[in-house]
Image (cartoon, grey):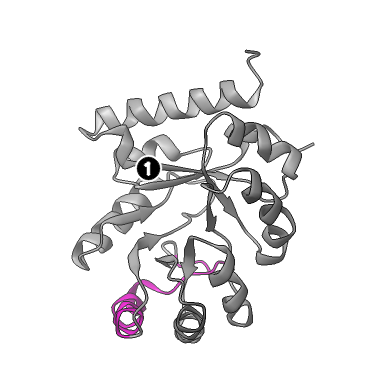
Amino acid sequence: MRPDDPETRLAAVNEAIARAAHLAGRKAESVTLIAVSKTRSAEEIAPLLAAGHRAFGENRVQEAQAKWPDLRVAWPEARLHLVGQLQSNKAEEAVALFDAIHSVDRSSLVTALARAMERHDQRPTCFLQVNIGDEPQKGGCAIDALPGLLAEARDAGLPVAGLMAVPPADVEAAPYFALLAKLARQHGLDGLSMGMSGDYETAVTLGATHVRVGTALFGARG
């Protein structure tokens, strides 16, 4: 294997996750590695599938619709996570395509997803996105709005597994990961979708159950 081929990169990321999990007294199997394949072609994704990886993340419904139906014919056990913002008018399509939705962040989306799940009789796992750094340009509900949103999601029958956040860029991520973990504990949630290529090991040591890694697996974009 070459140092820059997909299989080598996948092995390196999995080894780093295992090390971080061991430091935290956790099992590596408790962490789901989501290979973020946004903007990557089916030809770029296929080698990771061939290497045995099965969890992938996309940012946009329309882009995923263009790539994944054919890929899933060859690899039907692949699991698809929506990790980008979701418009309420795309809820139907998202429920039909994705196994998990990581960006539930407002009441209107809760309502749209609940209706879509009822109609399609499909129930993708949901994470509530928290705007952990209180950044106006980012999606996610405010921290003080989380209890209300969680109650709405549960009342609507959404299968809420946990919380998701994207910490502010260019600052130490650990305090934000620790805060998200604290919020999850306070609300009786086990799932923590946090950590990307630059900080996923820190996220694992602080309890991440799902890490969203793109560049470390696919290489830098051309």
Residue in the image at 29% along x and 51% along y = 178
Q: Please provide percent x and percent y for residue 210.
A: 40, 48
Q: In this rendering, is residue 176 above or below 44?
A: below
Q: Is residue 137 magenta?
A: yes
- Circle 1: element type: helix
Quadrant in the rendering for residue 216: top right
Query: Going 35% across and 50% down the picture, which residue do you hit?
Result: 177
Residue 36: % across, % down = 59, 46
Q: Is residue 178 above or below residue 188?
A: above
Q: Give the magenta-colored segment's residue range.
A: 134-155
At x 51% / y 78%, what residue is drawn? Answer: 120
Query: Disc 1 designates what residue?
Result: 203
Q: Give the quarter of the figure containing the N terminus.
A: top right
Residue in front for this viewpoint, 9 or 106: 9
Can see residue 85? no
Q: Residue at x 40, y 35 (%)?
A: 201
Residue 176 at x, y percent in the picture: 37, 53
